[in-house]
Image (cartoon, rainbow, N blue to C red):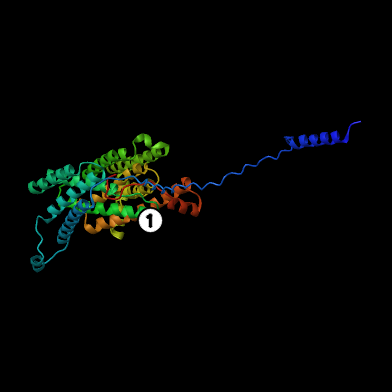
C-alpha cells in the first residue's frame, strides 16, 4: 500500500506537467492580422482634357483684301458699262449731254476692267494662275479696244462670254435647301448679266448663231475640264452620275441639233408656224424664253448646287449650268436685241427653269432622300459636304 505522501507528490507533479503542456493546435486561437493604417496616397492631379481638333479642312486662297480689290475693280467696270448703256439707250438733249458728258472710251474701259477681274476670279477659284490669266485678258482687251476692226473685238467678246459664263457656275456654293439653290441661281444670273454688258462693250461684229454656238462649245469644254478635277474624274460618277451626265448631254445635243435641223431642213409651213408662235408670244409678253435655258441650264444649276451639299458628283450636274449662263451672257450681242427684251427673256427663262428644277429636286428627294417632313428637316440640319467659301480656292 502506497503512502499518501507519495500519492500527493505524484499527483502534484502530474498536474504540473498538465499545466505546462502546450494547448492543442486545434484549440489555439488564430491571430487576426489587422492591416496597419497607412496614409492615403496622394493622387496626381487630373490632366486637362485634350482640345478637340477641328476636322474642317483648311481651304487656302487669297487674302480678303486682295479679293476686295478685284471685286472693287469689277464693280467700277460694271458701273462704267451701265453708265454707257444708259447713255446709249436714252435719247438725251444737248443740254443734258453737256451736263453729264460720257466719254467715248468708257464702255471699252469698263469691258476691259470686267473681263480682267473675271479672269482673275476664275483662275483663283479653280486653283489656276490668277496673275497670268488676268494679264492675258488685260492685254487682249486693251489691244482689241485700241486696234479695233472686226476680229479682235469679236475675239475679246467671245473670251469675255466664255470666262464670265464659266465663272458664273463656279462662283456658286452648295445649297442644302431649295431656297438656297434659288439664291445660287440668282448669283449666277447676275454674273452672266455683267458679262453680257462687258461683251457688248467691245462692240463686236458677229453672226448671232455662230457666235452663240462657238461660245457655248468653248464654255462647255472649259467647264467640263474644270469639273473633271473637282468631281474626282469619271470613275467617281457612279452609275447614277453616269445616267445623269448621259441625259444632260443627250438633251443638249437634241436641243441644238433639232433647232439647227428645223431651221435648215424643216418644212416651210411648220417652220413658219413655229416662228409665228414665237413672234406672237413676244408681242404679247415682250419676249420669248430660251428653250435651252429653261429645259437644261437653270434646272441643272439648281439641282447641281443641291446635290453638291451631299456629294461632290453634283459638280457634273452643275457643269451643264453653262447652258443657262452662256445664252444669258450673249443675250445682248444680237444686233436686233434691246435691253428690255433681253431682260424679259432672262426673267421668263429664269422663272420657268426654277419651277422645273423644283420638280426635279422633289422627285430626287422622293426617290433617294429620307421619308417624311421630319426626316428631311433632320437631314437638312445634319452635317453636309464642306466646300470653301464663295471667293476661296476650290
Q: Residue furthest right?
A: 1
Q: Is residue 31 left or right of residue 271?
A: right
277, 123: nearer the viewer = 123
Instruction: Give me the residue at 34% from left, 37% from top.
Output: 232
**How many labels, in total?**
1
Instruction: Give me the residue at 84% from left, 36% from top.
Output: 8
Instruction: Indicate the position of residue 150 as horizontal and vertical percent values.
Output: 12, 45
Instruction: Indicate the position of residue 119 as horizontal and vertical percent values.
Output: 20, 46
Picture quarter with the C terminus: top left
Disc 1 is placed on an element classified as: helix
Identify whether 24 is placed above or below 324. above
Q: Is residue 348 left or right of residue 132?
A: right
Identify whether 83 is placed above or below 391. below
Q: Is residue 10 left or right of residue 62?
A: right
Q: Residue furthest bottom?
A: 95
Q: Which residue is labeled 1 in the image?
A: 179
Picture quarter with the N terminus: top right
9, 207: nearer the viewer = 9
Q: Is residue 349 something one can see in this rendering?
A: no
Instruction: Indicate the position of residue 55 as horizontal and vertical percent values.
Output: 37, 45
Instruction: Indicate the position of residue 291 as horizontal and vertical percent values.
Output: 32, 49
101, 191: nearer the viewer = 191
Q: Is residue 281 something one can see in this rendering?
A: yes
Label 1 CA crowd tier, 10 Å (few <14, some 14–19, many 20+): few
Q: Quadrant of residue 110?
A: bottom left
Amino acid at each position: 500500500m502506497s503512502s499518501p505522501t507519495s500519492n500527493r507528490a505524484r499527483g502534484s507533479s502530474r498536474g504540473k506537467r498538465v499545466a505546462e503542456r502546450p494547448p492543442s493546435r486545434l484549440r489555439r486561437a488564430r491571430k487576426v492580422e489587422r492591416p496597419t493604417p497607412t496614409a492615403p496616397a496622394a493622387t496626381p492631379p487630373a490632366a486637362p482634357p485634350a482640345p478637340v481638333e477641328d476636322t474642317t479642312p483648311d481651304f487656302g486662297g487669297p487674302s480678303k483684301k486682295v479679293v476686295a480689290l478685284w471685286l472693287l475693280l469689277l464693280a467700277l467696270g460694271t458701273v462704267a458699262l451701265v453708265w454707257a448703256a444708259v447713255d446709249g439707250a436714252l435719247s438725251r438733249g444737248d443740254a443734258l449731254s453737256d451736263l453729264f458728258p460720257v466719254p467715248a472710251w468708257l464702255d471699252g474701259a469698263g469691258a476691259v476692267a470686267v473681263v480682267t477681274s473675271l479672269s482673275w476670279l476664275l483662275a483663283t477659284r479653280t486653283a489656276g494662275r490668277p496673275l497670268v490669266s488676268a494679264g492675258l485678258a488685260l492685254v487682249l482687251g486693251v489691244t482689241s479696244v485700241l486696234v479695233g476692226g472686226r476680229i479682235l473685238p469679236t475675239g475679246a467678246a467671245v473670251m469675255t462670254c466664255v470666262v464670265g459664263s464659266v465663272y458664273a457656275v463656279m462662283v456658286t456654293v452648295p445649297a442644302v435647301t431649295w431656297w438656297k439653290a434659288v439664291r445660287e441661281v440668282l448669283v449666277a444670273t447676275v454674273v452672266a448679266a455683267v458679262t453680257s454688258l462687258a461683251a457688248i462693250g467691245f462692240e463686236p461684229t458677229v453672226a448671232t448663231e455662230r457666235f452663240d454656238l462657238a461660245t457655248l462649245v468653248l464654255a462647255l469644254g472649259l467647264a467640263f475640264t474644270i469639273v473633271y478635277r473637282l468631281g474626282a474624274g469619271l470613275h467617281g460618277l457612279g452609275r447614277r452620275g453616269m445616267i445623269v451626265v448621259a441625259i444632260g448631254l443627250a438633251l443638249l445635243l437634241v436641243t441644238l441639233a433639232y433647232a439647227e435641223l428645223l431651221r435648215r431642213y424643216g418644212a416651210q409651213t411648220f417652220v413658219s408656224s413655229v416662228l409665228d408662235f414665237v413672234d406672237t408670244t413676244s408681242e404679247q409678253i415682250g419676249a420669248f424664253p430660251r428653250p435651252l435655258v429653261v429645259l437644261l441650264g437653270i434646272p441643272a444649276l439648281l439641282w447641281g448646287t443641291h446635290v453638291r451639299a451631299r456629294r461632290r458628283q453634283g459638280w457634273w450636274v452643275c457643269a451643264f449650268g453653262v447652258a443657262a449662263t452662256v445664252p444669258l451672257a450673249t443675250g445682248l450681242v444680237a444686233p436686233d436685241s434691246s435691253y428690255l427684251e433681253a431682260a424679259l427673256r432672262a426673267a421668263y427663262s429664269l422663272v420657268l427653269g426654277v419651277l422645273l428644277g423644283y420638280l426635279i429636286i422633289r422627285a430626287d428627294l422622293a426617290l433617294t432622300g429620307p421619308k417624311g417632313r421630319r426626316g428631311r428637316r433632320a437631314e437638312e440640319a445634319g452635317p453636309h459636304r464642306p466646300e470653301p467659301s464663295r471667293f476661296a480656292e476650290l
